[in-house]
Image: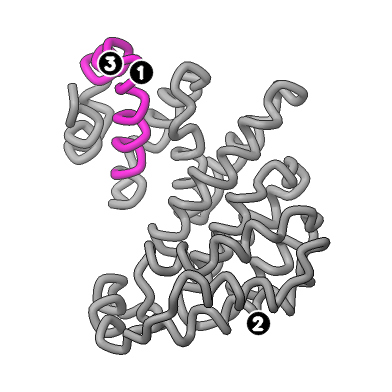
């Protein structure tokens, strides 16, 4: 793999940006490409494609390398408006290699406090495009879930938007609704979590069954007794896969 020193990466990011203000979306995307394309390892591409069921192309940049190369550039986007961040994300999403979608998620996650509930439709638009568990789960946990949690103090009804998402015909949108409380711990609306599990418990779709189990397992780290009781009372309404995932650490 071509080697690029940390110093040269910093110079590249600095050269592509005036530190006094963020890059415009098109310039940001060009700067990302300038950093990642030389870092690509052709030997990794077939393996990465296969891991994603040959649905996407790859540059051949592993996650730690990608983040190391782009962290400073993403940090320097502080001050970009929500519209600019979302435009950058859409432009990255349009590129064929999967690493660009990951950079878009890193960008939105790094500046998630710039986003508000009015941007949820734009975020769900990303969920529906080039959908697979890798991008969908990251959007759920590090972007959409955090937008909802950040807004809850001023908008106590904000999770109604997730209730609507749970009714979507798109399985990936439903998966986001199920997973949006990951990491909320004591902030979790357990009634909503358990209701979502029962609402979708009959579904045969693997990614829905797995998501329910994962969401329950995550909450079980904070409230094991509540999850244990829920599983005991509703085992017949959930798939064996869901129960196994939920009870993995109980």
Expressed as whole percent of the image width and height from the top left, the position of residue 159 reads: 63, 30
Q: Nearer the viewer, residue 65 or 98?
A: 65
Which quadrant of the view contains residue 149? top right
Q: Is residue 55 shown in magenta?
A: no
Q: How many marks?
A: 3
Q: Is residue 221 shown in magenta?
A: yes
Do the residues bearing badges 1 and 3 touch, measured as CB atoms within 8 Å? Answer: yes
Which portion, as a residue range, is magenta? 210-233
Q: Is residue 64 above or below residue 216?
A: below
Spatial CA span between label 2 and label 1: 43 Å
Which quadrant of the view contains residue 211? top left
Which quadrant of the view contains residue 95? bottom right
Q: Is residue 104 left or right of residue 37?
A: right
> Which residue carries the number 1 mark?
222
Q: Quadrant of the C terminus?
A: top left
Q: What residue is at 64 percent from the left and 35 percent from the top? A: 148
Between discs 2 and 1, the one toward the N terminus:
2
Between discs 2 and 3, the one toward the N terminus:
2
Using the image, tell me which numbered label, if any, was put on residue 127: none
* Main SS class of the magenta portion in the image: helix
Which residue reaches farthest front? 7
Mark 1 surroundings within 10 Å by alpha-carbon count, few (fewer than 14), some (14 through 19), many (20 or more)? some
Q: Nearer the viewer, residue 34 or 148?
A: 34
Q: Is residue 103 above or below residue 11?
A: above
Q: Is residue 78 above or below residue 32?
A: above
Do the residues bearing badges 2 and 3 touch, measured as CB atoms within 8 Å? Answer: no
Q: What residue is at 22 percent from the left and 36 percent from the top? A: 245
Using the image, tell me which numbered label, if any, was put on residue 224: 3
Spatial CA span between label 2 and label 3: 47 Å
Q: Quadrant of the N terminus?
A: bottom left
């Amino acid at each position: 793999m071509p080697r690029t020193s940390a110093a040269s990466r910093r110079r590249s990011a600095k050269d592509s940006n005036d530190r006094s203000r963020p890059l415009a979306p098109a310039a940001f995307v060009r700067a990302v490409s300038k950093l990642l394309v030389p870092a690509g390892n052709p030997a990794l591409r077939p393996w990465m494609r296969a891991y994603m069921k040959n649905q996407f192309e790859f540059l051949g940049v592993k996650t730690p390398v990608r983040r190391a190369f782009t962290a400073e550039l993403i940090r320097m986007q502080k001050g970009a408006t929500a519209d600019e961040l979302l435009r950058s994300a859409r432009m990255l999403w349009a590129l064929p290699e999967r690493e660009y979608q990951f950079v878009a998620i890193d960008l939105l996650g790094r500046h998630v406090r710039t986003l508000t509930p009015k941007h949820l439709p734009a975020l769900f638009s990303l969920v529906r495009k080039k959908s697979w568990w890798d991008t969908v789960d990251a959007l759920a946990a590090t972007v959409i879930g955090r937008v909802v949690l950040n807004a809850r103090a001023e908008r106590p009804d904000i999770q109604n938007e997730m209730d609507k998402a749970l009714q979507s015909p798109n399985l990936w949108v439903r998966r986001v609704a199920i997973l949006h409380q990951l990491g909320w711990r004591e902030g979790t609306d357990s009634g909503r979590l358990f209701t979502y599990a029962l609402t979708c418990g009959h579904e045969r779709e693997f990614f829905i069954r797995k998501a329910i189990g994962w969401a329950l397992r995550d909450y079980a780290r904070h409230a094991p007794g509540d999850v244990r009781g829920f599983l005991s009372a509703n085992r017949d309404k959930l798939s064996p896969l869901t129960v196994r995932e939920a009870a993995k650490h109980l």
